[in-house]
């Protein structure tokens, strides 16, 4: 009985899928150090920031209680994109038993392309964190900005007033500023720095700042306060896709911050083309990266 094209496709598909999965799993999912992944079932997702209430006033005896309103402050929107790429293997290559060489090579290359694009898109949120026109959030300003508007008419900052490189002073200032964050009505919120996110060029600086028992770069026997106080309990994460070599970011424990919506997990498909006899292999996924509450991060673009 002759082997049909459909049977040949079934014979090839397990090998290609196995190679694809092996290559993709080797990639470090560096976005998971920054973003919380959630599922999505629509073309876009929206999250609404509520203002909450102001400080409760004192009620004098016999007077009526004051009423307050909780309003919508702004809406953060996540548009799910479709990422896809494909390749084909000619009928002649299959006939001449070149599948092992061509198929494995192209499949690994396809896996690298899909993984690379995902990490680039994730890192773009931080790479554009200081560019208002590119990374404007629901409140209309950049992710890291000195004047995030509040519904009470005030502002709050999640970047330093003077840009600074990563060092002991700038990191301590970031942690102090995070502890002073306020909500939309100006009430203080109990947030703390959890993790330092840096490009690979700053990993040695971060190691000295956060792991040394004593202060870095001094002859004194002073304690490294960041380490001894348990600051940044999740340590630091290196992201190889950050483009600014001296920018650094401190992630906080704000509940609705950096989010990765997964509309469709990575799927692979193979089919035969009747006209050419070529075998075609496709990879496709849908997702989005963004942020809802800018209090999730404090960033400095570097000096």
Image: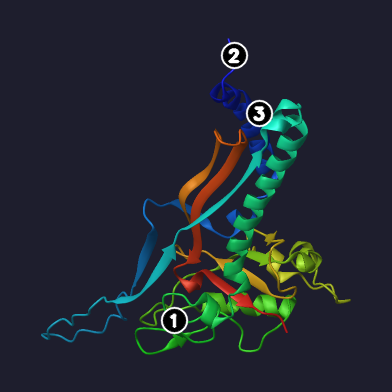
Residue 21's x, y, as percent? 63, 37
Mark 1 — residue?
140
Q: Neighbour class for label 2 at 10 Å: few (<14), some, many (≥20)? A: few
Residue at screen point 54% across, 33% down? 274
* Secondary-structure class at tag 2: loop
Which residue is more in the foreground, 251 or 1?
1
How far apart in space, not on screen, are marks 1 and 3 (Cα)? 49 Å
* Secondary-structure class at tag 1: loop
Q: Of tags 3 and 2, which is closer to the observer? A: 2
The picture quadrant where one finds residue 194 is bottom right
Q: Is residue 132 left or right of residue 48?
A: right
* Mark earlier in primary sequence (1, 2): 2
Which residue is more in the foreground, 234 or 32?
32
Query: In the current view of this chain or complex, which residue is farthest to the front?
Result: 275
How far apart in space, not on screen, are marks 3 and 2 (Cα)? 22 Å
* Mark earlier in primary sequence (3, 2): 2
Q: Is residue 163 left or right of residue 9?
A: right
Mark 2 — residue?
2
Residue at screen point 24% across, 84% down? 58
Q: Neighbour class for label 3 at 10 Å: few (<14), some, many (≥20)? A: some
Q: Neighbour class for label 1 at 10 Å: few (<14), some, many (≥20)? A: some
Q: Is residue 225 visible?
A: yes
Mark 3 — residue?
15
The picture quadrant where one finds residue 102 is top right
Residue 64's x, y, as percent? 12, 83
Residue 126's x, y, as percent? 60, 70
Residue 250's x, y, as percent? 61, 69
Q: Quadrant of the C terminus?
A: bottom right
The picture quadrant where one finds residue 293 is bottom left
Residue at screen point 62% across, 64% down? 123
């Amino acid at each position: 009985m002759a082997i049909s094209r459909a049977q040949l496709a079934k014979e090839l598909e397990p090998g290609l899928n196995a190679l694809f999965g092996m290559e993709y799993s080797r990639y470090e999912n560096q976005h998971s150090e920054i973003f919380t992944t959630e599922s999505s079932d629509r073309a876009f997702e929206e999250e609404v920031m509520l203002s909450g209430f102001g400080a409760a006033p004192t009620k004098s005896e016999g007077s009526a209680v004051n009423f307050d309103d909780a309003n919508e402050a702004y809406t953060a929107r996540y548009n799910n994109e479709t990422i896809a790429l494909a390749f084909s293997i000619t009928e002649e290559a299959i006939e001449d038993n070149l599948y092992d060489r061509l198929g494995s090579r192209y499949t690994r290359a396809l896996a690298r392309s899909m993984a690379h694009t995902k990490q680039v898109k994730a890192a773009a949120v931080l790479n554009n964190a200081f560019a208002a026109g590119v990374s404007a959030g629901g409140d209309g300003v950049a992710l890291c900005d000195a004047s995030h508007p509040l519904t009470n008419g005030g502002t709050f900052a999640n970047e330093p007033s003077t840009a600074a490189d990563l060092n002991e002073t700038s990191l301590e200032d970031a942690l102090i500023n995070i502890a002073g964050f306020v909500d939309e009505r100006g009430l203080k919120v109990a947030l703390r720095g959890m993790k330092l996110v840096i490009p690979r060029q700053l990993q040695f600086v971060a190691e000295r700042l956060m792991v040394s028992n004593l202060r870095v770069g001094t002859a004194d026997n002073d304690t490294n306060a960041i380490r001894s106080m348990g600051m940044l309990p999740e340590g630091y994460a290196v992201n190889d896709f950050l483009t600014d070599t001296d920018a650094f970011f401190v992630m906080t424990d704000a509940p609705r911050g950096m989010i990765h919506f997964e509309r469709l997990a990575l799927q692979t498909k193979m089919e035969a083309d009747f006209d050419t006899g070529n075998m075609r292999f496709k990879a496709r996924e849908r997702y989005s990266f963004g942020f809802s509450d800018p209090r999730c991060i404090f960033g400095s673009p570097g000096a």
